[in-house]
């Protein structure tokens, strides 16, 4: 993960939007992108990064689910729930760090988000 200083032009009351972008997978990031994306470049980046991150997590989750079901490893499906919670906590961490002024770029995901 790469850290850099975020754009500080966002009013202090709106900095919570960094965290909101990661709270509800995809939905809240789309909201933040629509409301703030045109005005604040760094918030736009975080909303796009969140969308791409959650799409990636969902795809990996379903691939692992299919593999576990196909191999009759039903007892391991509970671990997928744990992985989902860990992915959500990581998203909260990235959003919290952005609120505090630390810009975390998720590898691969951030590269894609920068090109959009």
Image: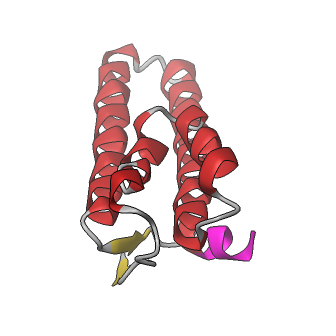
Q: Which residues are magenta?
A: 111-116
Vertical arrangement, residue 114 with respect to residue 15, above or below? below
Which residue shows up at 28% across the image and 43% down it?
Answer: 89
In the drawing, does residue 78 fall left or right of residue 69? left
Vertical arrangement, residue 74 with respect to residue 13, above or below? above
Which residue shows up at 56% across the image and 36% down it?
Answer: 58
Which residue shows up at 61% across the image and 76% down it?
Answer: 111
Is residue 105 on the magenta stretch?
no
Query: Which of 70 and 116 lies nearest the eye of the viewer?
Result: 116
Vertical arrangement, residue 27 with respect to residue 87, above or below? above
Which residue shows up at 33% across the image and 37% down it?
Answer: 83
Query: Which of 105 and 62 lies nearest the eye of the viewer?
Result: 105
In the drawing, does residue 49 fall left or right of residue 72? right
Report the number of discs: 0
- Quadrant containing the C terminus is bottom right
Residue 24 rendering spot, x and y as whole percentages: 47, 32
Residue 107 rendering spot, x and y as whole percentages: 48, 72
Residue 31 rendering spot, x and y as whole percentages: 61, 39
The single residue placed furthest to the right in the displayed view is 116
Residue 67 rendering spot, x and y as whole percentages: 55, 31
Magenta part, dominant SS? helix
């Amino acid at each position: 993960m790469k850290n850099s200083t975020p754009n500080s032009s966002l009013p202090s009351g709106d900095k919570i939007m960094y965290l909101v972008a990661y709270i509800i997978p995809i939905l809240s990031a789309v909201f933040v992108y629509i409301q703030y994306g045109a005005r604040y470049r760094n918030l736009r980046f975080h909303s796009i990064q969140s969308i791409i991150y959650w799409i990636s997590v969902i795809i990996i989750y379903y691939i692992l689910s299919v593999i576990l079901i196909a191999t009759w490893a039903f007892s391991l499906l509970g671990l997928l729930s744990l992985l989902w919670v860990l992915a959500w906590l990581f998203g909260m961490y990235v959003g919290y760090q952005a609120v505090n002024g630390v810009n975390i770029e998720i590898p691969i995901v951030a590269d894609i988000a920068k090109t959009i």
